[in-house]
Amino acid sequence: MTRHISIESKIAYQLLKFINFSKIVEVKMLKDTFNKSPALPGYSLCNKVEVHSFQTLGRSVWEITPKTANSSTTILFLHGGAYISNLTKMHWKFVEKLIECTSATVYVPDYPLAPEYIWKDTYMFLDELYTLLLEKHGERNIVFMGDSAGGGLALGFTLKLRDESKRLPDHVVLFSAWLDLSLSNPELEQYEKRDVMLTVKGLKAAAQRYAGNEDANLKDPRLSPIYGDFSNLCQITVFTGTNDLLHPDSKKLREVCEVHNLPLNYFEYPTMFHDWVIFTFLPESKDALKKIRKILR
């Protein structure tokens, strides 16, 4: 467990609570009014790095490469958004900070979103993209990284690769990961009272759209990787906050990894809210990036 919450995070938490942000997000989830178009890399990022975009199965992928001091690590970053919301400016700011601290090449895909697409389409897209990454960077260290839904997708895709006896990433890094679309953890009720970002009702609506039909098994590990087989996996790193609705499943993942003697870095931040890591001005986000730099080094 890390240090006490910063003043900046206390202010951010109280502001989000005051404006009832979780209910605002819930309404957008229920009505599916999120922007499906991705935010584009900003001037600050483009001024520091080389940005190249290409198409995979008709969707954009951005390849972000440092201009100098490029490392031997390639990161596939999968953005959060409950599988129904696309890349935001905050995600791009996080990518900018990530490259500053790691000097890694980072790939950021505009992967298929619900309800126009379902999880099978997203996995098909990742299969194609990962094949391309291996062709270009197969000799390098490959890291899957994602926040919220992107974290769940990163871990779920890793399980799929293992089941298919394909090359695994060297490391999976998860921030506030959504690991259980069935939302069946009995601790969720008490954590929902603390969370200023998410509600169970909103997430259930998003999960159903991503699953594709009412009869879908939400405990399928490709949807909810917490129910998967965790034998013979790679290194996993988890960042979680104790005021996050999804925190109980991060704790559960730690328990599962301990049972399977799976190498795990587990960082728990007291009273931090969901997806705090993409609030890059917060000291806790800066601290997480420092830990990533050390771990990936």
Image: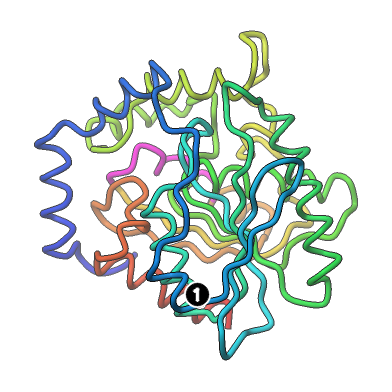
Image coordinates for residue 41, horizontal then vertical, percent? 46, 59
Count of marks placed on residues = 1
- Most extreme residue toward the top is 214
- Most extreme residue toward the bottom is 69
Image coordinates for residue 34, horizontal then vertical, percent? 41, 29
Q: Which residues are magenta?
A: 243-253
Q: Quadrant of residue 32?
A: top left
Alpha-carbon neighbours of circle 1 within 10 Å: few (<14), some, or many (≥20)? many
Instruction: State left or right for residue 246 relative to residue 61.
Output: left
The C terminus - image quarter = bottom right
Q: Nearer the viewer, residue 155 or 62?
A: 62
Instruction: State left or right for residue 130 relative to residue 210.
Output: right
The N terminus - image quarter = bottom left
Taken as a whole, is the magenta stretch helix, strand or loop?
helix
**Which residue is depicted at the point 38% across and 16% down?**
31
Image coordinates for residue 125, horizontal then vertical, percent? 74, 41
Q: Amino acid at mark 1?
A: Ile
Q: Nearer the viewer, residue 138 or 240?
A: 138
- Most extreme residue toward the right is 165
Q: Which residue lies under the disc numbered 1?
A: 99
Image coordinates for residue 11, horizontal then vertical, percent? 11, 54
**Which residue is depicted at the point 74% across and 48% down?**
56
Give yes or no for residue 249 being in the magenta stretch: yes
